[in-house]
Amino acid sequence: MTDSTFDRAALAGLGVIDVHVHVGPELVRRKYDVLTLAAELRAANLGAVLKNHFIPTTAWTSLARARGAVDLYGSVVLNHSVGGLNPAAIRAAIGANKADPASVAPDHQRIMVWMPSIHAAAHLAYVGRDLLPEWGCAEQYSLPADQIDGIRVLERGELSEAAVAILEAVRDEDLALATCHVSRDEVFALVERASAMGIQRIVVTHPFYQVTDLSIDEQCQLARYPGVYLEHSYAVHVMDHIVLDRYLQAIEAVGPEHTILSTDLGQVANPSIADGWCIFINLLIQAGLPLEHIRTMAATNPRRVLGDR
């Protein structure tokens, strides 16, 4: 980053919490395990929510916190590997959220519950497989959509009983909810019901990603619900070719106070988390976005979503 106007030293002073970081091992090649990731985040003064498509990350983040990591947050993605829309998977993730395994109560770090990603029906319809070999998955573990029962949160236009049970668990445990790779209609149904139930820690995951493809007007509609944040990720800009101008237009329309920035990094071929942030922030600054707005979206709002339980 020698040619950068915003470098790692500046990043360290920003207090960023990245709500979307991929960690391995899993069937996709990853740049980090929890210990190598924790070391990088500590050096850069970054926090993060750790995401894995197959298993909860709470045990890993607890292990890292026991060894000195501070702002590490676990999560569970409700894919088939944890039983899909399965409240027991949330209970298991909460149970592993302990830096001290002898403790009776889970740690104060809030966890994030992601709706389905690679097993969402909308994801399978768009991608055609759960995992693409070009993502770094061995071909024999990349399954075509017709071999997977895509998970839907809507049944005949209404939220399924299973989806409502997930929202009840999120509400009762005061967790954070992320919409992940569900469809546009599913996002609206989830946000509307979650808000009615009193859930006010909701992240609409990379809304421009082609699986969901929310217009800016639709993003503005969602931002009217209390505690809803629209998440714009560096990796979606780079890997899925969403032009930066669309992010800027959405931020202007929705407002920084309803927006979260993330990297969605952890891929082997992509930059490190810290470098990804420096690149992303430089692009936004060069496009005219004030640093204080970036701080709101990268640090303040994630802390509101993940504040201590």
Image (cartoon, grey):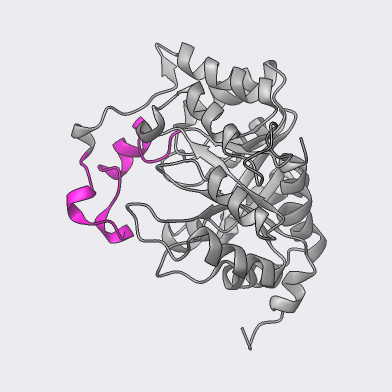
Q: Is residue 134 magenta?
A: yes
Residue 20 seen by the camera: yes
Determine the image quadrant of residue 143. top left
Q: Nearer the viewer, residue 149 or 287?
A: 149
Q: In the rendering, at what x and y percent does residue 269 appear?
A: 40, 70
**What residue lies at 48% left-to-right and 61% top-to-bottom?**
33
- Who's the residue at 42% across and 39% down the image? 117
Q: Which quadrant is home to the N terminus?
A: bottom right
Residue 128 location (% of width, % of height): 25, 42
**Front in this rendered view, residue 276 or 101:** 101
Lateral position of residue 181 relative to residue 244, left or right: left
Q: Is residue 132 left or right of residue 83?
A: left
Report the span colored magenta.
116-144
Does 225 sit above or below residue 50? Answer: above
Query: How far across and down, in percent of the image, does residue 250 sit?
Result: 64, 48
> Quick one: which residue is furthest to the bottom in this view?
2
Task: Name the residue nearer the viewer: 178 or 228.
Answer: 178
Percent of width and height locating residue 120: 38, 33
**Numbered circles on residues, count:** 0
Q: Left of 292 or right of it: where is 233?
A: left
Residue placed at 30% from the left, 43% from the top? 130
Q: Is residue 53 magenta?
A: no
Split into 4 quadrants, where in the image is the C terminus?
top right
Q: Is residue 206 visible?
A: no
Q: Left or right of 152: which side holds 175? A: right
Question: Most extreme residue toward the front, as rendered?
Answer: 102
